[in-house]
Structure formats: C-alpha cells, structure tokens
Image (spheres, rainbow, N blue to C red):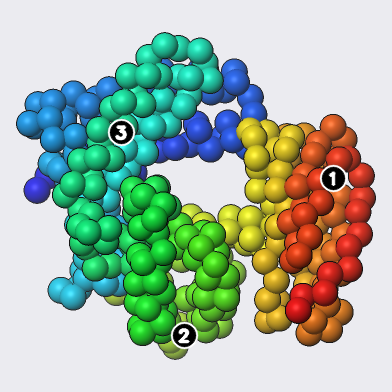
Amino acid sequence: MLMSQDSSPWADAATIIPWNVFMHDGDMYHLSINYKNMKAWVDHIIELDNKNGLHHLLDFGFHFADWLSLDNPNGGPFGKTDMYYVSSVYYYYSVLLVSKAAKLLKKDEYIYYYRKAEQIRTAIRQKYIKNGHVNITTQTALVLAIYFKILNENEVEKNINILEKMIVDKGHIDTGFVGTVYINDVLADNDREKLAYDVLLNESYPGWINEINLGATTIWERWNSVLPGGKMNSDGMNSLNHYSYGSILGWMYRYIGGIKAVEPGFKKVIIRPIFDERIKYSKLRYNSAMGEYQIYWKYVNDNRVNITVKIPFLCQAKVILPKKVIDCKSGTYKFDIKLK
C-alpha cells in the first residue's frame, strides 16, 4: 500500500492545529486566515469518499493510524487498532471542526459540514459500535470512541470499564501516537483519576518515568528509543525529543495544575486540580492570551490541601474543589480544603 499526503491523522493537522491555536489565543483573525486551508483538506477527503463509494468513512488508502503502538501481536510499528477506524474518527473530527469554524465565522456552509459530520459519525457507529460496545479490542479504539463522542452518553460507562480493566490487567498502557494523546483525559474525565495518575507515574516500561529513570530529559519517539544500558533501539525512528508521547504535559496542565479554557482565549476558565498524595504539591503558571494564571496547591497532611489561585484582569474562573464550587473574578484567592 503506497503512502500519500492523505494519511490520517497526520494530514488532519490542517484542521486541528488552527482550531487549537484559536482555542488558546481566541483570535478570530487567525481562524479566518486558516479557514480556507481547513476547508480545503476536508473537501478533499469528502471528494475522495465520494469517489470510493461514499461510505461516509475514510476506509481507503494508507494511514499511519496508532503509530508505534505496542499492541500489535505481530510486532512492527503499526498498532493493532484498525487504521480505517482511526482515519474515519479523524475524518469525523476534521469535518466537525470545519463546521464549528464556519459557524464562528458566520458562514452558512457550517450546516452542510455539521450534517456531513453526523453522517460520518453514524457510519462509524454502524460499523464499529455493536450493542453499545466498541467492537475493536484495543485501548486506543476505546479511547477514541469516548474522547470524540462516537459513543452515546449512556454507552460510555461500560466502555470505560473495559478500558480500565485492560489497563489494570496489562499493568500499563500500550497505546501509540493516537491513543496516548487522549488516554489520561478519558480516564480523568470519567472518574478514573487515580488510574490516570497510575499511568503517569508508572516506572516500568512503557512509561514516562521509565524514560526519566533511563536518563531522559525530553520525551522520546518510541517508548523504548533508549534501552536499559543506554543503547539506542536498533529499529530506528528514535527522536529523543518528540511531541506524541510528550503530549502528557498538556494533561498535567489541565488536570494536575487544573486549568481548562471554557471559551477561546482563556477569558473564562475552569480550575479543577486533581489531587493525589503521590504528588505532594503543584505550582502552575500559565501565560494565557488574557494574562497569567497561577495555581498553587500542596498537601498539608493526608486529608487537607491548601490552594492559592490567581486570576488575571477581566477574566473569570469557576473553581471546582471537593465539596465546593466557587465563581471567581480577577484577583487572588486562597482555599483550605478538607478532602475526606
């Protein structure tokens, strides 16, 4: 199968990067100048879909999919997750992002792209969701179905239970470039905060702390780019400073530091740190487009946490703490929280 410029999810950078930049800076101008390119990528894939039978799936061509995943029983860089499932999920997501961008830019075509996205989601469900379960037995398949809302709300719990069991039984995650980016978000957003911390703090292979224990100061392209004893992995592709698994840092900002944007540009945020006794304290400083947020928390004892939050001028935060939710405006706030 020949590689091409159409390979998902790499090519979906055309929609995902402009959208993520907009979510962080809130600048409609940047979104507007990138919209033509976002739309061009999506229109290209829709055209290819039409030429390949109009299944509303990206079920043709070559795709890297869950690259360098560890779950392929035959080895090699390709993960076990069906590459057409991965590419179809990203097809759905890219079309949905174009719809959202078009609506913000007051373009009537947002309706067309929204309906197209719904057709793709329906097609994915018809092929890959059976009786409310994802019919691909990999961690990444479950993560994508939950994160991108391919599953209906009433189907999530039974699938997160399966994901939890898979991780616990294996003792670690085995996701590649695709699944790793979202797995801790999915766990933390579905009441598996401790398991998310377990994944983060795992010291055995594969894991981030394992890399650190082997001397890493940046995150590697492979889970085992450097082998015990210091030798490089002979399979190649051993960048020692690579984004894919390094994406865990974003999770640390969102869930340990505890800051998430409610609207583009971080003028309104949710502040909700997830505490774990293995992390004694956290100091976050985030220089947003609206100014610097600061969140500092530390354990006083095993049942009490002190928190200081600083919110920049003209910004608002909903601070969500155990047994307490506080709406805060600009300023500095201090909380003493009893956990149990």
Which type of secondary structure does the marked residue at label 3 adopt? helix
Three-letter residue code for mark 1: Cys
Closer to the camera: disc 2 or disc 3?
A: 3
Outermost residue, front side: 154
How busy is the neighbourhood of tag 2: few (under 14 within 10 Å), some, or many (20 plus)?
A: few
Tag of residue 58 = none
In the rendered image, which residue does mark 3 sit on?
Answer: 118
Residue 292, image quadrant: top right
Q: Residue at x 12, y 30 (%)?
A: 54
How busy is the neighbourhood of tag 1: few (under 14 within 10 Å), some, or many (20 plus)?
A: some
Three-letter residue code for mark 3: Glu
In the rendered image, which residue does mark 1 sit on?
Answer: 328
In which quadrant will I find the C terminus? bottom right
Vertical position of residue 67 compared to residue 28: above or below: below
**Which is nearer the N-term, disc 3 or disc 1?**
3
Question: What separation in Å lies between label 2 and label 1 (alpha carbons)?
Answer: 41 Å
Q: Position of residue 27 (x, y in %)?
A: 63, 24
Three-letter residue code for mark 2: Ser
Residue 67, image quadrant: bottom left
In the rendered image, which residue does mark 2 sit on?
Answer: 204
**Which is nearer the N-term, disc 2 or disc 3?**
3
**Which is nearer the N-term, disc 2 or disc 1?**
2
Residue 175, image quadrant: bottom left
Assess whether mark 1 and mark 2 are in contact (beta carbons under 8 angstroms): no
Which type of secondary structure does the marked residue at label 2 adopt? loop
Numbered-mark total = 3
Asked whether the viewer can see residue 182, the reply is: yes
Q: Residue at x 79, y 39 (%)?
A: 316
